[in-house]
Amino acid sequence: MPLLSKNWVLALLALLSGAGLTFSFAPYELSLLAPICVAVFYWVLTRKRSGKVFWFGWLFGVGYFGLGVNWVYHSLHLFGAAIAPLAALLTFLFCLALALFPAILASLYQRFQQSHSPLSNALLFAALWALLELLRGKLFGGFPWILVGYSQTTDLLGGLAPAVGVYGIGFLVVLWSALAVGVLQRKSNSSSVLSLCVSVVLLCAIPVSAQIVNRQSFSAPVGSEIQVRLVQANIPQEMKFSQERLVNSINLYTQLTLENLEPNTLVVWPETAIPTYFDRVDEGMQPFVDEMESRGVEVLAGGFHRQDGQVYNSVRQLGGDRALYRKRHLVPFGEFMPLRFLLEPISAFIDIPMSDISSGDGPHIPLQLMGEAVGVSICYEDVYGEEMRALLPESTVLINVSNDAWFGSSAAPHQHEQKARMRAREFARPLVRVTNTGISSAIDYKGRVLGRIPHDELGVFDVQIKPRTGSTLYAKTGNWPVLITALMCILLAMLQRPAGLFRQSNI
């Protein structure tokens, strides 16, 4: 079809396939779009044996990240006090920079592909995709947002989460897409029968293996159920750090906590529910704490801990042993200024409260709450499954507290909850996430939502959580199997075509 060979058509398909891929994530969760859009992008690359594939990859990335993470604008402009043009410019540049990852993918794929081996090409493409996603999750602190594996959180391939994690699922989604394109494009004079048979077997084996793994539990119930209350006060971000409203904010949380409260309950307040230092409010909150202890209630609240001149974004038990966790993985620009020597001038135009804090140190260990080992994370720490492995297998319950008010009414709160569901599946643990303005939810060990408080609503949600013990394969091995597999696939491609290392590539 001559029309489909034209550069402008291929460029448009690359852009649209990237944009379409974003609809496979929350809040839309059209999971089948993921393999379809990846297949279209792969097909575009197979149509260009030479030429400007770098730009096709970049256009795919512009569509992908331009729609998928444009919520950065909300954070910078609406709540970071950056003027609209500056916020738009920074968001635009951020998305363009992220688009370099699929652009590099396209160039590397063109350099090492084998024209006579669709199976090898599919493995190479999936390996490069996985390797670059892993790199994106690490580089400059990491930004592992809208990884393609998240598109399968509640779908069939999500069943593989306890075995291979979100990066492994992404590798398999991309592999399946590329294999499908290779099989459909097969020509009798260019593809061996063996290669075709292996491709078809893999196309069938991937979903079948996901179904088999999904039927396994990987963890077992332990101890008694815990009564947990999620508290979502829905305090607008523009009012949250107002010192004039500090007392009113804390009073709202205490009122919601006391409302029809059952004894022996674990109450969870979100990140920075106490928008000041804990030691500033300890004395004033003591009567509330005393009442909670008399009822056998434990309260875990977000706030700020200061020690030796350092300030930490933290969660702390109010009363009792005052169990404390200090956030370790900070948000660039939101909690610290990266490359300060270079970006200091920009910070003058962005006003984010408590945006110069320290990272917690020491081992990441569970907190003892309600007689259980509870693995706690703050904000987007829960998007780093590799780091959360430190909490396993000791933790029987996982809790994430966050303040997703920074994202406004964008797709980001839904995307963030989707990542929490993936963590629950990866570690086969129930997970409770509580946020300031939503979405707060209780998630079972299979990633299913037991109940939630919707975005931009005030309320509480009571749920019975069953602690679990045991260890998944992913909890034991992390991302190493995916990394090793990807490197082996790339190495094999290089060995099959040694001249490819030095072949000129027209980007």
Image (cartoon, rainbow, N blue to C red):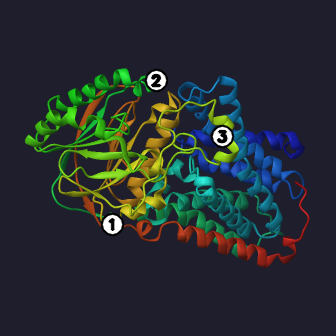
Q: Which residue is drawn at the image coordinates 88% and 71% (left, top)?
A: 502
Please indicate whether residue 66 sits to the left or right of residue 355 in the image: right
Considering the numbered disc 3 on the image, is that residue within a helix, a strand or a loop?
Answer: helix
Q: Position of residue 242 (x, y in %)?
A: 41, 24
Q: Is residue 154 visible?
A: no
Please indicate whether residue 37 sits to the left or right of residue 257 in the image: right
Viewer-nearest residue: 309 or 505: 309
Q: Residues within 10 Å of mark 3 (few under 14, many from 20)?
A: few
Q: Amino acid at mark 2?
A: Glu
Q: Quadrant of the C terminus?
A: bottom right
Badge 1 is on which residue? 393
Badge 3 is on which residue? 344
Badge 2 is on which residue? 238
**Disc nearer the start of the sequence (2/3):** 2
| C-alpha span from label 1 to label 3 | 41 Å
**Disc nearer the start of the sequence (1/2):** 2
In which image quadrant can residue 74 be found?
top right
